[in-house]
Amino acid sequence: MLEIDNLTFNYPKRRENVLNDFSLQLAPGGIYGLLGRNGAGKSTLLYLICGLLFPQKGRVLYKGADTRRRLPDTLSDIFIVPEEFTLPAVSLNQYIKINGPFYPKFSVDDMHRHLSTFDIAPDINLGALSMGQKKKVYMSFALACNTSLLLMDEPTNGLDIPGKSAFRRFIVSSMREDQTIIISTHQVRDIDSVLDHVIIMDNHNVLFNHSAFDITRALKFASTQDRDIIQRALYTQNNPSGVTVVLPNNDDEDSQLDLEALFNFALESPGLLNRQFTNLLDN
Ligand SMILES: Nc1ncnc2c1ncn2[C@@H]1O[C@H](COP(=O)(O)OP(=O)(O)OP(=O)(O)O)[C@@H](O)[C@H]1O
């Protein structure tokens, strides 16, 4: 269990807090999408979760331990793939030899399996890779560490088109049931089919926090030109072939979660969206 209790955080010399009395609890297992406008504090939250930043107030507990204590047992069970990183100019084998031992469940076989999903040979030198290739190698290493918590900041930025679909395969096929992955991203089309849970941040706090199952139970997403349907919609946005609509799912129909529409709906009418969920949970 990841427990974020009343977190308040600001960087030095900034007027407004980045996070203000921010609380969130994540049950273990599953892929969480963390969404928010630019500057909402998504990266900051990931750094606070893994103990790279310390809050001014509140705390983050992972499996009962405060992550700011940076205990070896905690740090060896959490991995973060930041949006930007550097890799040393060494062979992959050397990199694994140096870094693998910090993670007791690291598996070379898993590493090779993940690399092959991305079509990358294992006998490479990390200094001779493009940024996108480095990202694929680093994400493969991250997953091969088999930590129970994996944090990824904009993981699909810089990946080519085959790399983006490989990423979805890589995430879904490689994660274990007890593993929790938090993915912060703006590239919603790259991940909307793999998420188990959606968290939207705004105004220094959590704006929306529900499972994909509950979202598609409460809401129906469609693209239409039918005026009657458009008039009944809770939220509409134009698309090149008609109108994307979000409707109350009164007749229990299955539809594909449209993360972009959900995100825009949440920012535009958070009260209406959250009321829809209160109604669903009451029924
Ligand atoms: N090192 C820093 N020093 C001062 N302010 C910072 C620092 N890093 C981030 N900030 C500020 O904190 C706020 C939150 O930044 P953060 O990077 O967490 O947002 P984000 O939601 O990840 O944004 P984006 O979607 O653009 O990546 C922003 O207003 C940013 O300007």
Image (cartoon, grey):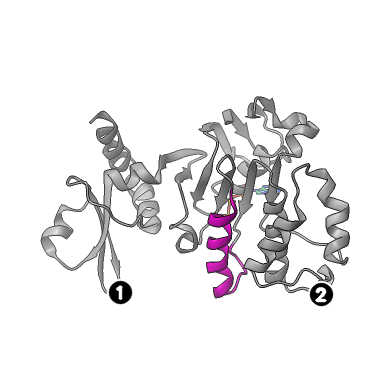
Q: Amino acid at mark 1?
A: Pro
Q: Can you give x and y, in whole percent of width and height, for residue 244 in the image?
A: 27, 62
| Cα distance between the residues tagged 1 and 2 | 41 Å
Q: Is residue 165 magenta?
A: yes
Q: Can you give x and y, in whole percent of width and height, for residue 183 in the image?
A: 56, 51
Q: Which residues are magenta?
A: 156-175
Whichever of labels 1 and 2 marks the residue nearer the N terminus, that label is 2
Regarding residue 234, the answer to whether it shows in the image is no
Residue under label 1: 240
The quarter of the picture where residue 132 lies is: bottom right
Q: Secondary structure at mark 1?
A: loop
Q: Residue at x 82, y 44 (%)?
A: 102
Q: Can you give x and y, in whole percent of width and height, for residue 277 in the image?
A: 30, 37
Q: Residue at x 28, y 41 (%)?
A: 272
Q: Nearer the viewer, mark 1 or mark 2?
A: 2
State the quadrant of the C terminus: top left
Whether residue 216 sits left or right of residue 140 in the image: it is left
State the quadrant of the N terminus: top right
The quarter of the picture where residue 59 lies is: top right
Q: Amino acid at mark 2?
A: Ala
Residue under label 2: 128
Looking at this rendering, what residue extends furthest in the front direction?
A: 109
Q: Can you give x and y, in whole percent of width and height, for residue 103 in the image?
A: 78, 44
